[in-house]
Amino acid sequence: MADPSEVFADQLTLLVGPFGCTIVFAVSAAPGSEPAHPKTVASVRVSLEHLKAMAFLLHKGIKDYERENVRVPFSDKTLSILATPRAEWEAFWDEK
């Protein structure tokens, strides 16, 4: 088996189907560069059960970090890009 790769990604696409999920990690193109579309750096395929376990562990890990350190801010601009209302975001993260 090949050594694991370490990559940087600033974009994520989640493709969910009835039998599993593909998580595509990508990096944005530099401003003004050609081609202007993101470059895929990794694709990870998992079962839906694994995806749900990963979501739980990611959520728990961030909540634990924020409880022990500092709340991680999230801008209204980024919420707009995600098409997510602030109220929905706060309900998910249990923020008031």
Image (spheres, grey):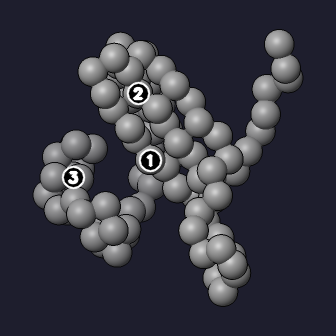
Q: Is residue 95 visible?
A: yes
Q: Residue at x 41, y 61 (%)?
A: 73
Q: Position of residue 59 (x, y in %)?
A: 38, 33
Placement of the C terminus among the 4 image quadrants: bottom left
Q: Nearer the viewer, residue 96 or 16?
A: 16
Neighbours of disc 3 within 10 Å: few (<14), some (14-19), many (20+): few
Image: 43 above or below 9: above
Which residue is rendered at x = 57% and y = 57% of the image? 10
Give the residue type at disc 3: Glu
Which residue is the site of mark 2?
A: 21
Q: Is residue 92 found left or right of 27 in the rendered image?
A: left
Quadrant (top left, top right, bottom left, bottom right) of the N terminus: top right
Residue 13: mark in rendering: 1
- The single residue placed furthest to the front in the displayed view is 35
Q: Amino acid at mark 1?
A: Thr
**Residue under label 3:** 90
Q: CA distance from mark 1 to mark 2?
A: 10 Å
Q: Secondary structure at mark 1?
A: strand
| Disc on the earlier residue, 3 or 1 | 1
- Amino acid of disc 2: Cys
- In the foreground, 54 or 75: 54
Instruction: Judge the density around disc 1: few (<14), some (14-19), many (≥20) Cα neighbours within 10 Å.
Output: few
Residue 10 lies left or right of residue 13; in this view the side is: right
Q: Nearer the viewer, mark 3 or mark 1?
A: 1
Relative image position of residue 84 (x, y in whole percent) = 22, 59
Identify which residue, 50 or 72, lies in the foreground. Answer: 50
Residue at the spot 33% in from the left edge and 68% down from the top edge: 81
